[in-house]
Structures are given as structure tokens and as C-alpha cells.
Image (cartoon, rainbow, N blue to C red):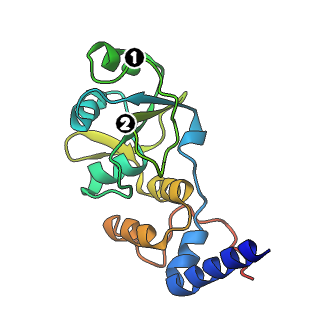
Amino acid sequence: MQRDRKALRRERMIREVAGPVWHRMVRVVPLSFAGQGRLVARVLLASREAVIEALKPDAVFAVDTAMRLAHGVGFLAIQEVQAYLVGTEPLDRLAAAGLIAAEDHFDSILVRPWPGPTRLLACRVDELPPSRGVQGGFRVVTGERLGRELVGTVGPRADLFVLYEKVEEIEPSASPGVASTPPSHP
């Protein structure tokens, strides 16, 4: 019971400190990157940049990778590659070129608090999600989807949500992926 009360106090404090940002953020409908298809993790054997360049014709980049490609900054400390792919051919091609491991890695946790090898986290889908082109010819998820993926990946992190709104140049009154009815607040 004490643990639950402590968690409730912490959540209440975060809501109060974040103020209007909290209200905008909790109205966003979260989207789980890993839940969109079959998540495959492969260890990078080459530089992150080389893997991203090799995936350019096949992938729509997501989550932190999309943020870094579109704006030069990311949400997560570890710089892994997150991308949507159709089929296994791009993974096989990168493995044959020696850019990624040929075998799936057992650890497919998207945001992990422990160290480990840098990975490609590929969500295999039937159809690529809506995307936009950014500098360098890369395709990344739309701004609205990026906000939904952020909340679905890291949860209610007002600091990261403010960064997202700032770089996407979103007016505080217009939130992406807003639920049709505002949530009730206790």
C-alpha cells in the first residue's frame, strides 16, 4: 500500500509540474512501435549510419531514429535503429553485406535500462506506415505518428514531449493523435 501511495504521489507531482503539457500529452493516443507487426532485433556489425543508409530504399524510420533523421536530436540515450520494413529481404541483404548479424538477437526490448550491443529494431509489417521525406532522402514516420510513438514508447514524459512539440513546431493548442474525448482527471 505504501508503494502504491508513493507511486500515486509521484504521478500527481508530475501532473502538477507539467501542467498544460501533461494535459496535451495524455490526450495523445499512444502507438506501440513493437505492436505494429513482428519485431525483429539484429545486432549492428557496422556503424549506425551505414545501416541507416543501406535501409534507405526499403524502410520508414520510426521512434528515435525518425527524430534524429528529421531533426538531428533524439529521445533515447542509446542510438539504435528503429525502422518499419516489409518482408525479410532487406534484413537478409544487410546480413549478407556484413552490416547486421544474420541471426535474430534475443533482446528485443525497445527501451532497455541495461547495456547491450547496438541493434537494429525492425518492425516487419504488411504495409509501410504513412511517411514523409526528410533531408538526405530518408523516409520517416509523419509528425503526428512520431508523437504517438513517443508516448507509446516512453510513456508520459513531459520533458520529451516538449522537445517533440518544439522540433515539430506544433502549437501547444494542437496536439497530435488526440483522443476524440478529453480524459477525465481525478
| Residue 90 sits above or below residue 124 on the image | above
- In the image: residue 139, left or right of residue 12: left
Which of the two residues, 143 or 77, is positioned nearer the viewer here?
Answer: 77
Residue at horizontal 35 percent and vertical 55 percent from the top = 77
Q: Quadrant of residue 24?
A: bottom right
Q: Which residue is mark 1?
A: 102
- In the image: residue 33, left or right of residue 180: left
Which of the two residues, 32 or 48, is positioned nearer the viewer here?
Answer: 48
Q: Quadrant of residue 76?
A: bottom left
| Residue 153 sits above or below residue 184 on the image | above
Check disc 1 and give the amino acid type.
Answer: Ala
The quadrant in which the C terminus is found is: bottom right
Give how far apart the Cα atoms at labels 2 and 1 are: 15 Å
- Return the mark for residue 117: 2
Residue 164 screen position, x and y as percent: 39, 65
| Residue 52 sits above or below residue 26 on the image | above
